[in-house]
Amino acid sequence: MEKVKIGRTELTVNPLGLGTNKIGGYNLFPNLDDETGKQVVQTAIDHDVEMIDTAFMYGFGHSEELIGDVLKNNDREKVILATKGAQQIAADRSVTLNNNPEFLTQAVDESLKRLQTDYLDIYYIHFPDQNTPKAEAVGALQRLREAGKIRAIGISNFSLEQIKEADADGYVDLVENQYNLLQQDAMHEVVPYLKERGITFVPYEPFAAALLTGRYSPDNLPHLMRAITVCRLICINRIN
C-alpha cells in the first residue's frame, strides 16, 4: 500500500487507519469489552495498519489506557499514534471545551502517561472552544513539538475560517473532519484549501457510523441512529 505524507512533516503512513472510539470509548453504541478492544488494536497492528486514532473523550481516557497496554508489547516505531484533547471534565462529569495553552499542555502530558509512550505522532485539538485564539492554541502544540512530545499538529471539527486562523503561523499538519457519502461538505471548501496549503485531510466516520456498512436495515436501526440519519438526509436535500 502506497504511503502518504503527513502535512508538512517527514512522517509517512499507510492511508488506512483504525479509529478507536468504540474501544473503551464514549460513543453512541455499546462498547466492546476491554480485552476484545485490545485484540482489535493488536489485530490491526498485525495486519500493517499503522495509524491508530484515539482521543481523551473516548471513555475519558480509557481508550488511551487500553491502547497503551497494547503498544507496550509492540514496536512503538511501527505505529503512527494519534490522539486528541480539548475536553475539560468537571466534578459532576459535565464537559466543557478548553483550548487554553496551559490546559492543552497538561492534556498532552496526561495522554502520554495513559498511552505509555514518551511521544505522540499526532496530537489534535479535538474541538475549538469559543474563547481561545486558534493560533495561540496551536502555538502551544508547536512548543510541545519543539520539546519532542509530539511530531505533528492536528485540529478537528474546525470550520474553514477557524482552520485559517489556526494555521496563521503555518504549524497545522492535519485536519480531521467528518466526511462520507452522506456528509460531503468538507469537499466543497475545506479540502481544496488544505490541498493548497499542504495540509493532510483525515476523514472521520467514513462509513457514517456504520450506516453505510449494511449492518442496519430500517427494522433494526437504533432510535438515535434514525434521528441522526433523518438529520443528515435533511442536510443533503437542503430541507428547512
Image (spheres, grey):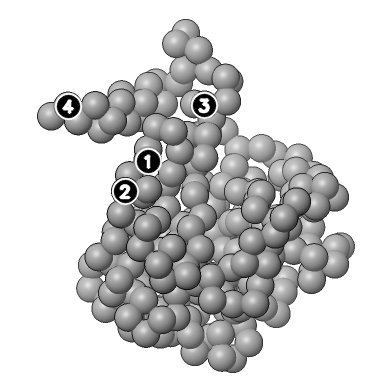
- Tell me the mark number nearer the camera, choosing from 2 and 3: 2
Q: Residue at x 39, y 32 (%)?
A: 182
For disc 4, the marked residue is 239
Relative height, residue 218 to residue 9 (above, below) = above
Residues at discs 2 and 1 in contact (Cβ within 8 Å) = yes
- Tell me the mark number nearer the camera, choosing from 2 and 1: 2
- Tell me the mark number nearer the camera, choosing from 4 and 2: 2
Which dot marks residue 240?
none
For disc 3, the marked residue is 212
Q: Secondary structure at mark 4?
A: loop
Q: Earlier in the sequence, mark 4 or mark 1?
A: 1
Relative height, residue 194 to residue 232 (above, below) = below
Left or right, 93 with respect to 124, comes to: left
Q: Secondary structure at mark 3?
A: loop
Left or right, 18 with respect to 25, comes to: right
Q: Secondary structure at mark 2?
A: loop
Q: Earlier in the sequence, mark 3 or mark 1?
A: 1
For disc 1, the marked residue is 184
- Give amino acid for label 2: His
Count neighbours of disc 4 (C-alpha within 10 A) and say few if under 14, some if 14 to 19, many if 20 or more: few
- Give amino acid for label 1: Gln
For disc 2, the marked residue is 188
Alpha carbons under labels 2 and 1: distance apart: 8 Å
Residue 110 visible here: no
